[in-house]
Each structure stands twice: as C-alpha cells, then as structure tokens.
Image (cartoon, rainbow, N blue to C red):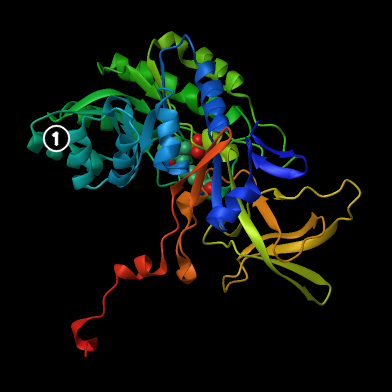
Amino acid sequence: MDHFDYHDGELCAEDVPIARIAAEVGTPFYCYSTATLERHYQVFAGAFAGADALVCYSLKSNSNVAVVGTLARLGAGADIVSEGELKRAQAAGIPAHKIVFSGVGKRREEMKAALDAGVLQFNVESLPELEALNEVALAVGTRAAVALRVNPDVDAGSHHKISTGREQDKFGIAWADARATYAAAARMPGIEIVGIDVHIGSQLSSLDPFESAFRKVADMVEILRAGGHNISRIDLGGGLGVPYHETDQAPPLPSAYADMIKRVTGHLKCQIILEPGRLISANAGVMVSTVVYVKRSGDRTFIILDGAMNDLLRPALYEAFHRVLPVSEAAPDAPQSAVDLVGPVCESGDTFARNRLMPPLAAGDLVVFCTAGAYGAVMSSTYNTRPLAPEVLVRGGEFAIVRRRPSLDEMLAAEAAPSWQKP
Ligand code: LLP
C-alpha cells in the first residue's frame, strides 16, 4: 500500500499534487512519501513484535538522510556497506549500537571508522577480511564483534544479478568452510564471535528459498554452539520482494515471513537481525518526468522523457518493470495505445518500457514511474553530464527538497585541467 493516489484527477503524493512539486523543483525528480515509509516500517517491525528482533533498514536501497531519518525516528537500525553509509546513518540519527556493517570488500579505513563509531557488528565474508579486521581491531585496541556471513548455496529464484546465495556467487563463506573459518576466528584476539549472517538475494517472491537457507543456518548454529562458539545473534539479511506490476503474484506478507522465521529459529533463543531495504522504500517513492517530445517513427511511437537511464537504471540493467502513470488522470474512456517510453541518453538501452499501453500523452505532460523509491536515486549517475535528480519528501500537505539538483558549475567544480593544458 502506498500514498500516491489521484485526487480530483490529479496524482498526489499524500495531500500534495505532484504537478505542484514539479512546478517548483523541475523534472526529473524523485518524490517520497513519509506516510508510506512509516507504514511499511511499522508493518514489518510489527510482524516481529514480541520477538527479540532488530530491524536494520538496508541503506543501499535508499540512503537519503531524510528517508533514513524518517525511519530512525521509528527506532530503525541500519545495515550499511560503506563508510559513506555509516556517515549517512549517523547523520540521520541511527545510533551506532543499531548498525551492522555488511559487504564483501570492506577496506581497512572503513573498518577503523566503524570500530571508532562502535557499530553493533561486522558481517564478515572471507578469511582475508577476518584477518584484516583482527589487525585493525588490535591496532585500535579493541575487539570487533563479528557474525560470519555464510553462503548456504540456495537459489533465491530472483533475477540472476541480484541472487547472492548460490555457491558460484561472490558472497559469504562457502558452506564447507564455515566451521573452519569460525575456528580461525576464535583464535584471533581482535575478534569476538557473536553470531551468524546470511543473505540469499533480493526481490524474492516466495518464502521457500528463505526457509531452506534459514533452516541450514539454524542447523549450523547448533553445530557451532556444540563446537564452543558463542552464537547469540542471527542476521537473516533482507530480500523480501514487492509487487512492481498489477498482475505480479503478491509477494509473501511480512507477517508470513516473520512467522516462518520464528518457527525456524525460535528454539535457538537468538536475537534476530533483519535487513529489509526494498520492502520499506520501493513503494514509498516515484520518479517524476516530463514528456519532451512525442516522436512517430514508422509504426512506433516514442515518448521521449526528460528522465533517463542515469536517473532510474533498473529497466536498463535488469529489464525491470515499473508502472507508469500520467499525473493528470486519463478519462476512463480514453483510448490506450502501445508506446515506447524512452530517455534522451545516447543508448538504445535508455528505454524504460516498450509497447506499453498508455493513454494519450503530449509534450509537457508529466508521468511518474511507480515503485522507484528503492534502488532508484541511489543508483543514479551523471552519465551524459546530467545532474543528479533532486529528491523531495512529502509529509501530509507539505513537502521539502531533501536533495537539491546540483548546478552544472558544481558538477564541473571537482575537475581540473592538468598543468600542461594551462595557458
Ligand atoms: N542485506 C544485504 C547483505 C544485501 O546485499 C541487500 C541487498 C539487502 C540486505 C537488502 O535487500 P532488499 O531487502 O532490498 O531486497 N539494485 C538491485 C537490488 C540489489 C540488492 C543488493 N543487496 C535492484 O534494483 O533490484
């Protein structure tokens, strides 16, 4: 459920007409709904009420400080993968003791920054990473709390680029090496083993792969405990999918996901850490764009927008589907015709949708891409020297620009001609 609806024929974000924001901010821009973010967080966290669980919102899905701040006020923790995300989580008010540091390639400087901050735990993915963390912790004069991320060799059944729990994927410690790696960790004076971690992929539409992976992890907890290791936390990662298409089979509800987790891990009496990203942020955001030209070419109609693949990469990268709505509601009897929705970037891949049935659109019309709050703005680039799209957060009848559009001069300011080109 989200809070982007038509009021009197005008698409609104909560109580604010999107056209009003567009007039002030210009397009393309991202627009987020506070009520939707809050609702998603509360539904998810509520599903774990009564259990010893910590919800660590995965910043990579949308790390705008205002978005993270909205969730911080509800008590969310954070799943981070870089020093930059650490800074954002802290700027948004998430205390370090609710932050878990994930990622397959943490650098030593980043480890030090996270140790200095006092994060709750590091999710470590390899023996070399463990050795580096041990050294950094000893140099700082502390011990790093560690969960080892194990690779359960379970296929998430999601897009191949976002499935992470198969043996051939770069993530986690191979199942067969897990016990030996725990034994190595136990011998390192700068490492304190606190738990185990798993994340098998993103946009999962079934609970079955989760359950297979979590059962394996639960069995491993018992094996590790029998080996003398202290496993008091299980981090189960993120990955629960959202509907992008009206006809998508509805993904499992957070309540069903939580019930399964309680059933599979409850007997272990561990604290459960969850890292949802998309589930919280995806439907809380849209990307708003203006039609620049309608171009007819042979039997095709191209709707050329001012938003492009640099602003919303998912269709180009994953052939992802995003619903597109006109901001001015089409009349119920308006004719629909198949069009290609494209951006202005010089690549054929800069195509948001092909043969999409849309009501009539003309230059100057506004459209929104739905379900763009996750992995939208965060994956944008300045390709073709296009400024990063601004981000707007709505709350009830008010809105705020929470990231402004940089000027072209700001974009060029970090670049310099080498001395030999100077007059
Ligand atoms: N935890 C870890 C260790 C992760 O790698 C991820 C996502 C999450 C949590 C959050 O997963 P979520 O709940 O959002 O599914 N750019 C892609 C998605 C990449 C996901 C990467 N890892 C997309 O646009 O679909």
Which residue is painted at 42% across and 39% down in the image? 66
Q: Is residue 54 above or below residue 122?
A: above
Task: Report if residue 274 is visible in the image.
Answer: yes
Q: What type is the residue that disc 1 sits on?
A: Ala
Determine the residue located farthest toward the bottom in the rendered image: 423
Q: Is residue 2 left or right of residue 146?
A: right
Q: Quadrant of residue 33?
A: top right
Q: Is residue 364 above or below residue 82?
A: below
Q: Is residue 388 left or right of residue 136?
A: right
Which residue is painted at 48% across and 56% down in the image? 380
Residue 116, image x and y in percent?
17, 35
Residue 8, image x and y in percent?
77, 40
Q: Is residue 212 above or below residue 358?
A: above
For disc 1, the marked residue is 137
Residue 417, image x and y in percent?
26, 80
Which quadrant of the rendered structure holds the C terminus? bottom left
Which residue is painted at 29% across and 72% down in the image? 415
Residue 225, image x and y in percent?
31, 15
Q: Is residue 395 left or right of residue 357?
A: left
Task: Report if residue 201 is visible in the image.
Answer: no
Label 1: element kind? helix
Q: So how many labels did they put on this image?
A: 1
